[in-house]
Image: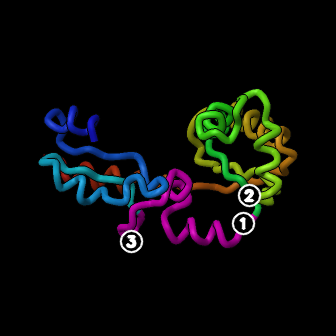
């Protein structure tokens, strides 16, 4: 909100590259109403705000739901998570020491994770993604899989933001 307030007068529209993200943005329409500048968040083809970065690249709420129902036991990784998993797990207190993954191994076993699922968006350095995902899988004793992704949610949300520009 603070950052949007800072830039709103400089923008014709604001596109938020987030989804609900644990319901942090569930009230986005109410928040957007506070701005004269149009505020757009990532939405799927039926107009639902996507759940998170995973749902965004899978195609939306329905595709994410189907993914969850059909691909059990997988821990999803995108390029950002693959590159920063130690820091993220430390920041979210899953690891007390980012260089000692033993705590997280126990949690992964309890959650019955069997494999790492690489979200293949084609964005970023794919060789680095491959290397980082392999390190993650090896660290936690997980197999590997991958899912081809789409950028249609991002592209359609971008088009919607452009159409709302004053």
In the rendered structure, does residue 6 fall within the stretch colored magenta?
Answer: no
Q: Image point 74% across, 66% down: which residue? A: 72
Q: Image point 21% across, 37% down: which residue? A: 5
Q: Which residue is mark 2?
A: 74
Q: Is residue 126 visible?
A: no
Circle 1 SS class: loop
Q: Is residue 21 visible?
A: yes
Q: Are marks 2 and 1 in contact (CB under 8 Å)?
A: yes
Q: Nearer the viewer, mark 1 or mark 3?
A: 1
- The percent position of residue 50, horizontal first and vertical second, equals 45, 60
Where on the picture, by quarter, is residue 126?
Answer: top right
Q: Which residues are magenta?
A: 44-72
Residue nearer the viewer, 127 or 116: 116
Circle 2 SS class: strand
Q: Is residue 45 left or right of residue 38?
A: right
Q: Name above or below for residue 78 compared with residue 71.
A: above
Where on the picture, by quarter, is residue 90?
Answer: top right
Residue nearer the viewer, 29 or 103: 103
- The percent position of residue 100, horizontal first and vertical second, equals 79, 31
- What separation in Å lies between label 3 and label 2 (alpha carbons)? 27 Å
In the rendered structure, does residue 51 fall within the stretch colored magenta?
Answer: yes
- What separation in Å lies between label 2 and label 1 (alpha carbons)? 6 Å
- The numbered mark, 3 or 2, whose residue comes first in the sequence reads 3
- What separation in Å lies between label 1 and label 3 (alpha carbons)? 23 Å
- The percent position of residue 135, horizontal first and vertical second, equals 80, 35
Q: Which residue is mark 1?
A: 71
Residue nearer the viewer, 23 or 146: 23
Q: Few, some or many C-alpha atoms within 10 Å of disc 1 (few <14, some 14-19, many ≥20)?
A: few
Circle 3 SS class: loop
- The percent position of residue 75, horizontal first and vertical second, equals 71, 53
């Amino acid at each position: 909100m603070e950052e949007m307030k800072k830039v709103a007068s400089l923008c014709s529209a604001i596109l938020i590259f987030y989804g609900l993200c644990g319901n942090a943005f569930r009230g986005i329409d109410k928040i957007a109403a506070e701005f004269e500048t149009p505020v757009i968040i990532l939405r799927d083809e039926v107009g639902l705000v996507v759940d998170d970065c995973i749902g965004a690249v899978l195609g939306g709420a329905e595709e994410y739901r189907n993914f969850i129902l059909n691909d059990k036991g997988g821990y999803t990784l995108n390029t950002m998570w693959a590159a920063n998993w130690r820091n993220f797990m430390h920041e979210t207190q899953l690891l007390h020491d980012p260089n000692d993954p033993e705590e997280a191994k126990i949690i992964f076993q309890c959650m019955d994770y069997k494999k790492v699922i690489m979200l293949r968006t084609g964005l970023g350095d794919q060789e680095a993604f491959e290397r980082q995902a392999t390190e993650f899988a090896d660290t936690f004793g997980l197999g590997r899989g991958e899912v081809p992704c789409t950028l249609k949610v991002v592209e359609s949300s971008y088009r919607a933001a452009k159409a709302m520009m004053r």
